[in-house]
Amino acid sequence: MTMPDIFGTTLFDGRMAPRGYALNRMCYSFNSAENRAAFVQDEDGYCARHGLNAEQREAIRRRDVLALIAAGGNVYYLAKFAGIFGLDVQDLGAQQTGLTKDEFKARLLAAAG
């Protein structure tokens, strides 16, 4: 069964999982305060130790969540990366939709009814 394309959406599926494995594994490591500190101290070295490719490393440098998703990142793991910078899942959703965080929150509330 193939999934339909959803305009503007990168689906995280079985094809994307291997592509983003190193990135998602690195983001999972941020559950540890020690690992978050190591990342902040030497971002590029930390990315290299986890095997991120050039596309992923550049997206990390730019803090570009959409590029990280396109590079195989799973939003739930990327939230751990974003948390280092004080961002939460609503900040990520706002980036994905091109809205401000307040606009994104209002859209969520309106959809909830």
Image (cartoon, helix red, strand yellow):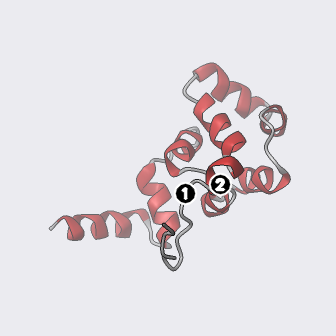
For marks 1 and 2, the one nearer the N-term is 1
SS at circle 1:
loop
When asked about the image quadrant of residue 24, the answer is: top right
> Residue lying furthest front in this view?
1
Residue visible at 77% across and 34% down in the picture: 50
The disc placed on residue 12 is 1
Per the image, the residue denoted by label 2 is: 72
Residue 47: x and y in percent read: 78, 38
Residue 34: x and y in percent read: 64, 19
Residue visible at 37% across and 66% down in the picture: 104
Along the horizontal axis of the image, is 40 left or right of 93? right
Quick check: 90 above or below 47? below
Quick check: 52 above or below 25? below
Quadrant of image for the C terminus: bottom left
Q: Which of these two is toward me, 105 or 25?
A: 25
Residue visible at 51% across and 66% down in the picture: 96
Q: How far apart are the alpha carbons under marks 1 and 2? A: 7 Å
When asked about the image quadrant of residue 81, the answer is: top right
Q: Residues within 10 Å of mark 1 (few under 14, many from 20)?
A: some
Q: Are marks 1 and 2 in contact (CB under 8 Å)?
A: yes
The amino acid type, in three-letter code, at marker 2 is Gly
